[in-house]
Amino acid sequence: MAGKVFFSVTMSLDGFMAPDAVPVGYVFSPEGRDDPRVRRWMAKWSELQAWLFPQRWFRENLKLGEGGEEGLDNDIARATYERTGASVMGKRMFDGGEPAWPEEAPFHTPVFVVTHTRRDPWERPGGTTFHFVDDGIESALLQAREAAGDRDVRIAGGAETIQQYLDGGLIDEFSLTLAPVLFGTGIRLFDRVDPDRLTLDQTRADASSRVTHLTYTVAKR
């Protein structure tokens, strides 16, 4: 039986999942390190993701050393990873991550990159292989489903890719981790989604001392 298609992202209280649109590839480039825009981007991104960095699972997955926090946030982060049999991401997310991820990329599953450019698969230590799909989001999802087997497929991002899957009626479920930060500007998660095409039902709400985790199922109207 095929698993679910889902996404799981951290979002600011005013609805942004990323800071201002500085190209992520530039953020992690040598040229970008001294740019004030990049420093501001990194500060806001770090504030948004601050709940995740101290978690034991996060430290283990990125091989940052022993120790770390345990509890609700750690359990949710670990469960998200364990349910995922394959991931799908957009080319912009891949371009930003390629120079930033460690050699052992943190996915440990097949990852299907939606792109317009043909490229041979890129295999990394630890079980991650990036496959480049140049014939659309549905083809990428079909390949990801086959690779995931009975496990779930995660639409990893970025925002535009998630929006395309939502608008296409291809998402079964999603989780938002609401962080107590305000961005004011940035990249909104739901900007390009047609609200008349989707019905949401809240299925879980879990609050820690740092953030609130909300889970919704998605149905077509």
Image (cartoon, rainbow, N blue to C red):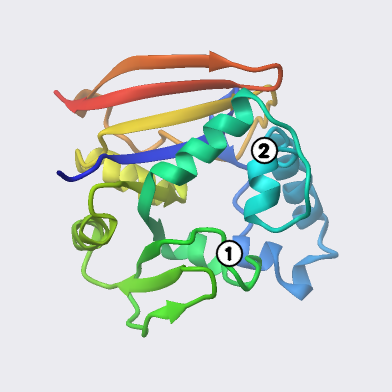
Q: In this view, does 125 lie to the left or right of 47?
A: left
Task: Name the spot of residue 31 as percent of width and height, x first.
Answer: 77, 74
Q: Which quadrant would the C terminus be assigned to in this image?
A: top left
Task: Name the spot of residue 90 as percent of width and height, x first.
Answer: 41, 60
Which is more toward the observer, 170 or 56?
Answer: 56
Query: Residue beneath label 2, please?
Result: 52
Which is more toward the observer, 146 or 132?
Answer: 146
Q: Which quadrant would the N terminus be assigned to in this image?
A: top left
The answer to whether residue 188 of the structure is visible from this angle is: no
Say above or below: 2 vs 32: above
Q: In this view, does 67 lie to the left or right of 51?
A: right
Query: Residue beneath label 1, please?
Result: 96
Disc 1 crowd, CA 10 A, few/some/many (<14, 14-19, 20+): some
Task: Name the spot of residue 162 as percent of width and height, x first.
Answer: 37, 45
Task: Name the spot of residue 177 as percent of width and height, x first.
Answer: 55, 28
Q: In this view, does 172 lie to the left or right of 54?
A: left
Under mark 2, the amino acid is: Leu
**What kind of element bears circle 1?**
helix
- Residue 118 lies in quadrant: bottom left
State the mark number for residue 114: none
Q: Are marks 1 and 2 in contact (CB under 8 Å)?
A: no
Q: Residue at x 46, y 51 (%)?
A: 158
The residues tagged by marks 1 and 2 sit, at their Cα atoms, a distance apart of: 19 Å
The answer to whether residue 90 of the structure is visible from this angle is: yes
- Dot 1 or dot 2: first in sequence order is 2
Return the residue found at the far front: 66
Say above or below: 35 vs 65: below
Q: Residue at x 81, y 62 (%)?
A: 35
Disc 2 crowd, CA 10 A, few/some/many (<14, 14-19, 20+): some
Q: Is residue 173 left or right of residue 36?
A: left
Q: How many labels does the image show?
A: 2
- Residue 34 lies in quadrant: bottom right
